[in-house]
Structure formats: structure tokens, C-alpha cells
Image (cartoon, grey):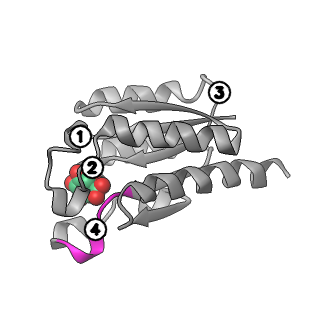
Amino acid sequence: MTILILHGVNLNMFGKRDPKHYGTETLNDIDHQLNQLALELGVEVESFQTNHEGQMCERIHAAHTDATQAIVINAGAWTHYSYAIRDALAILTIPIIEVHMSNVHAREEFRHHSVFSPIVKGQICGFGVESYLLGLRAAASAIQISKT
Ligand code: DQA
């Protein structure tokens, strides 16, 4: 069971970036915690980060043929306007969970809207690193449910 974790634009800067919203843990720390939880849950995770929209689309396209069974995505600012990434995600039929470290609804208005909302299984935001961990749990149980 393989779950693809997608980190979008600027998320490689976690640890240095706006600690009030994103804390002080780095993307490596987050991936480490995801790997630990994956072991507990008995799933495999693969993480991918890019600052290039086209590369993100190509990684999502590859998920059609590489045995990915679910996706957890924090697309960063792309969440709010990237129809290209939304269209790439929409081609997939596997469960997609959208996550955000910060509570996007309590921040600037442009962050309140996600162009992914209509095509994802659900959204988790506002729990810091825990948003990713909850997202991984949600993805693992969505795969189990679709198998039964
Ligand atoms: C974010 C929220 C987005 O609005 C922002 O552009 C990010 C990070 C989050 O994890 O809270 O880059 O996705």
C-alpha cells in the first residue's frame, strides 16, 4: 500500500519560514514523522517536493502507473489558484487528502478558497505537523475502506 506525499511550492522552507504559522520543524522532520507513522500503520510512503508547477503535474501523472494508492497533498499557495494541478489530480481515481499546516480559514481571504476542494476526499488544516499525520491516517483508512 503506497501513499504519495506531495509538498508544493515554498514548503522546502519550513523551519525558516513564518514560524507563527508553520512552526520550526523542517520538511525533513515532517517526512521523518510521516515515515515513523507509516511503519506503525503498515503503509509505504514516498515524499516529493517541488517549486515547479509542471514538475508537480508530471509527478501526479506518474501516480497513474506507479502503484500509488492514495495521495496526501499540501500544495502551498498553488492550492488557491492552480487549475493545472487540480486538473492533474482530477484525472486520478484514488483518494486524495488535502492538508495545510496553518488554519487557512483564519488567515488572509485569498487562503480561504481551495481550487482542490471539489475533487479531494477531505481537507485537514490548522494542526501544524499533525495535519500531515492526520492526513496520512485518513489516506490509509480511505484505502482500507475502498478495499472492503
Ligand atoms: C499552507 C497554506 C498556504 O496558504 C500557504 O501558501 C502555504 C502553506 C499551509 O500549510 O498552511 O504555503 O499550505
Real-space Cα distance between discs 3 and 2? 25 Å
First of labels 3, 2 by sequence position: 3
Residue found at x 24% / y 76%: 106
**Gap between marks 3 and 1, in whole Å?**
25 Å
Q: Is residue 16 visible?
A: yes
**Residue 2, above or below 141:** above
Answer yes or no: disc 3 within 8 Å of ligand 1: no
Mark 2 crowdedness (10 Å alpha carbons): few <14, some 14-19, many ≥20: some
Q: CA distance from mark 4 to mark 3?
A: 31 Å
Judging depth in this view, the residue of 85 and 101 nearest the camera is: 101
Residue 103: say if magenta. Answer: yes
The residue indicated by pointer 3 is: 67
Q: Is mark 4 within 8 Å of ligand 1?
A: yes
Q: Earlier in the sequence, mark 4 or mark 3?
A: 3
**Residue numbers of the magenta segment:** 100-107
Q: Residue at label 2?
A: 76
Q: Which residue is mark 4?
A: 104
Could you tell me how far apart the alpha carbons at marks 4 and 1 are, in whole angstroms?
16 Å
Mark toward the start of the polypeptide (2 vs 4): 2
- Spatial distance from mark 2 to mark 4, Cα to Cα? 10 Å
Residue lying farthest to the right in this orientation: 148
| Mark closest to the chain's N terminus, 4 or 1 | 1
Q: Quadrant of ligand 1?
A: bottom left
- Vertical side of 78 occupied by 6: above or below: above
Confirm if mark 2 falls within 8 A of ligand 1.
yes
Rendered residue at 70%/34% (across/down)? 1
